Image: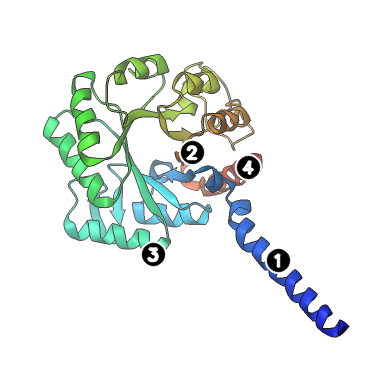
Amino acid sequence: MNYKIITVITAVVLLFGSACKVRTSGSGKANPEELLGWQLGAQAYTFNRFSFTVALDKIDSCGLRYVEAFPGQEIGGGITEKMDYKMSASSKAYVKKKLQQKGIRMVSYGVIKMKDKEDWRKVFSFAKEMGIKTITCEPEIAVMPLISSLCDEFEINAAIHNHPKPSFYWDPEIVLSSIKGMSKRVGACADIGHWVRSGLDPVTCLKKLEGRVYQLHFKDLNERNNVKAHDVHWGTGVSNISGVLAELKRQNFKGMLSAEYEYNWNNNTGDVTVSVQNFRKLL
């Protein structure tokens, strides 16, 4: 038997095995949320002191690949139009190109409140054109049937967002009663930070909304039951981030988690980066 040939074959097999291991486990190890079907990104409102163009640069630097755009933010890059359904065709083309260049997907848009029924249709049409999958919103109860039908027509989700009490949707029970009988595409955008500000437990709230949680606004706060509580690095506050992650796993949640860091506004890129790193370590 030629032992030199055996030695070479063994070396090749070991090398090939190592290469396969890197290819299959590398991405999941760096971004473990992807293995669960989670899209960890940022609500552009985190960077509302800057244009959408600059916000994309900041999101990229945080190690994130998804964005939830918000209406009212200037597009930037020499364009003074806002990120809303009224933007021109040329501005839409610019935004699409910029997203492609950065390797970032705009999968969500909001939080919106519209009074005119025709404007709701325009928003859904805009979302469809831009490839948006979920619209986060706080609609009036009277237009909920319209939103339900638009969700089915355009095949886009509507996720009802909660601000702190005394805002209308502060309690998940109110969200549940509001979406009862509506399309399965109508669910909740769970802002866990606002629940904490309202004195609610995020895990308990998620359990109440099981099966209808389509997106989250992710926050960790420095104290409970205080509307003035502020963001801290994820995993270092009172929002029970570990418990929230465990509950999302149990529910087999699929969707976007938007980092929404509403503190240290002018210099919070580092805060978001640390939070994302903590998130992935915890996960």
Camera-near label (2 vs 3) is 3
Picture quarter containing residue 168?
Answer: top left
Real-space Cα distance between discs 1 and 4? Answer: 31 Å
Neighbourhood count class around disc 1 (C-alpha, 10 Å): few under 14, some 14–19, many 20 upward: few
Residue under the image location 57 percent in, 23 percent down? 223
Instruction: Determine the residue located farthest toward the front in the rendered image.
Output: 1
The residue that label 3 is drawn on is 101
Residue 20 drawn at (x, y percent) = 65, 64
Depth-wise, is mark 4 or mark 2 nearer the camera? 4
The disc at residue 17 is 1
Q: Is mark 4 on a helix, strand or loop?
A: helix
Mark 4 neighbour density, 10 Å: few (under 14) some (14–19) many (20 or more): some
Q: In this view, does 254 lie to the left or right of 147?
A: right
Q: What residue type is labelled 2?
A: Tyr
Q: Which of marks 3 and 1 is nearer the N terminus?
A: 1
Secondary structure beneath disc 1? helix
Q: Residues within 10 Å of mark 2 (few under 14, many from 20)?
A: many
Label 2 residue SS: loop
Residue picked out by circle 4 = 278
Nearer the camera: disc 2 or disc 1? 1
